[in-house]
Amino acid sequence: MRISLALALAATTLSIRAEEIVYDYDEHIAPILEEYCIGCHGPDKQKSKFRLDSFERLMTPGSSDEDPIIPYVPMESPLLENLLMPKSDEYAMPPEDEPSPTADEILIIAQWIYHGATSSKAERAKLPLEQRFDPGPLAAIMRLRANGAIVQKLSAKDAGITADLRALSGDLTAEDFADLHLIAAWIEELNLSGLSTLPSDSSWFAGFERLKVLDLSGASLPAAHVAALSNLESLTRLNLAQATLPADAVAALMVPQTDHLFISGLTANRKVLRELHARHPDTKIIGSWDLDQTNIVLQNARHDSNKFDPGEPIILGEQVSAFGIKHSLLLCGKFTGIINENNEVMWRGPNGARDGMVLPNGNVLISVQGEAREYRAGSQEIVWSYRLDERNAELGTVNRLPSGNTLVVERGVVPRLLEINPDGEIAVEVPLLPETDNNHMQTRMARKLPNGNYLVPHLLAFKIKEYTPTGEVVNVIPTDLPELGGREVRNWPFTAIRLANGNTLANLTNGNKTVEFAPDGTVAWRVDNDDVDGRFADPCGGQRLPNGNTVICSYGQRESTKTRIFEINADKEVVWELFFPPSTAHQAHVITTNGKPIHPVLR
């Protein structure tokens, strides 16, 4: 159907102009996208960082940086290309398990692009404010301007408004707040610096749904109004420098989640600052010291000098266990570091590690920034490294072998598994068969088996493959079994851990489950969100402990009440959790449990 439709489109675009069928985004295109696309590209989920729940977002590139729509050229528009792909293609929109637009609906989208991909509302937004607004909002703008406020469009072609009330004569009155609320839905930048009065209703901020930049520097804000700011989902820049507000309100602030937060002069309380940094891992916080670098200096001082007392220990997490379990462990993710059983950060490494382990001599081996690095125990000194081949894009796996070689996996044009000797030379090279050229989705945590072969999970192939050192595939464990939900639930294998009983333990990342496969590929044991109260959210790394318990890294967990790393027993009971806001928990290596070293290490 897709091939015949593409041929029909190619022919149709030659005759569209004669028919003069002109469609509008708001009336004709938005309803189609709402029905088939918003689930994956809307406010709740943004695959490939692409949203199409408004005209402006539809016309904005996602992670690929390609313009989704090329006006007047439908067959060169990536959106239409993806709609026409075979459903089996990983880039097809919608995906294979979702309903798709009909042939007529795709033709409507093609004709809309052919005629310029226009939106009547967007065209109206280009008009001067005086021509664009109804009498009520326009009168509000005029009153604010008459009182000294600056209210104008962000640009000639932009629907957004900027409002600067610094020059307003006198304090803001209830009438001023009411006027602002009448135009709140269009305001994207708002300056209320120095504000000493606020509307009595803290929900007043809720009307600013498009607000991206908010300046409240020097303002006086009660706790209820600070809490209301957390509902501004579009906010990217927030200035609270020199503002007056309760310290606990600062620590609880949830916005912005990207870009910049200015807090100069707001608080010097280290606990508050740690909580603030933990809640805003992707936000640059201006006005406090670099907390990450400070932590590294303090922890290095703890290791390097018995006489130096760094003062308050760095405690960023909390271990919870009704069974009295305490672990020390290496965490790899947005936070990379070792925490002890008292939750103190004992070592910090570079953020963004993908895999890692603590070696018997205390050194730390991690994969980060396209490089495998070994750090001397308790320091930032790199004593060994291997750099990703320039032909490839990502280096994921890193694992020190009993031979002294280091196992790494490269993803890219030449996907391969390597053993690197202590001199940094390639001792073994195994070409991999990931069945996709999507670099990021080719492989994850590969491990070497006692028999000398290698166990490699391939995400988009839905397979765990066992390779010989010569590259021959001698066994395949499929992860798209019907009893696990099939391919529709995206049971992409992330880990492949060979257990002493011959079974293989796998975290199925997008499928949100952990499965133990018997040697014949059947399911011997499984656990999913029904068993652990929704703790699974894109599980990545994991570890099987000697007592049979399993530690799971729930990399994608974003709910503050749920942990990103937890331990379950064979009966699927959650027996231990680590709440550690700075980390995304890509991989973990549990080092000790209640003071006893963990052996063997199955991870």
Image (cartoon, helix red, strand yellow):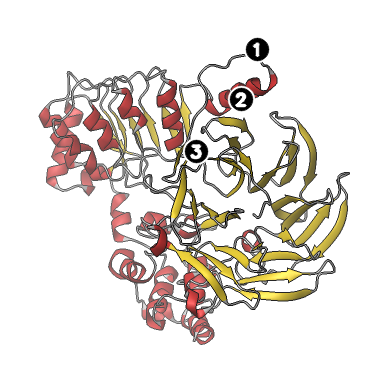
Question: From mark 3 to mark 1, how far is it between C-alphas?
Answer: 29 Å
Residue 18 as seen in the image, left or right of residue 153: right
The foreground one among 340 and 294 is: 340
The foreground one among 571 and 406 is: 571
Question: From mark 3 to mark 2, how far is it between C-alphas?
Answer: 16 Å
Residue 86 sits in which quadrant?
A: bottom right
Kind of residue indicated by mark 1: Lys
The label on residue 263 is none
Q: At which x and y percent is residue 477?
A: 64, 74
The label on residue 299 is 2
- Residue marked by disc 1: 307
Q: At which x and y percent is residue 454?
A: 75, 64
* Residue occupying image coordinates x 63% and y 59%: 440
Q: At which x and y percent is residue 188?
A: 32, 40
Quick check: marks 3 and 2 in contact, CB under 8 Å? no
- Residue marked by disc 3: 582
Indicate the secondary structure of the residue bearing disc 1. loop
Indicate the secondary structure of the residue bearing disc 2. helix
Question: From mark 2 to mark 1, how far is it between C-alphas?
Answer: 13 Å
Position of the C terminus, as image quadrant, is bottom right
The answer to which of marks 2 and 1 sits earlier in the sequence is 2
Is there any visible trace of residue 65 in the rendered image? Answer: no
Is there any visible trace of residue 559 in the rendered image? Answer: yes
Q: At which x and y percent is residue 326?
A: 52, 40
The answer to which of marks 3 and 1 sits earlier in the sequence is 1
* Residue occupying image coordinates x 12% and y 44%: 136
* Residue occupying image coordinates x 65% and y 65%: 457
How many marks overall?
3
Kind of residue indicated by mark 3: Pro
Residue 565 as seen in the image, left or right of residue 328: left
Disc nearest the viewer among 3 and 2 = 2
Residue 536 sits in which quadrant?
A: bottom left
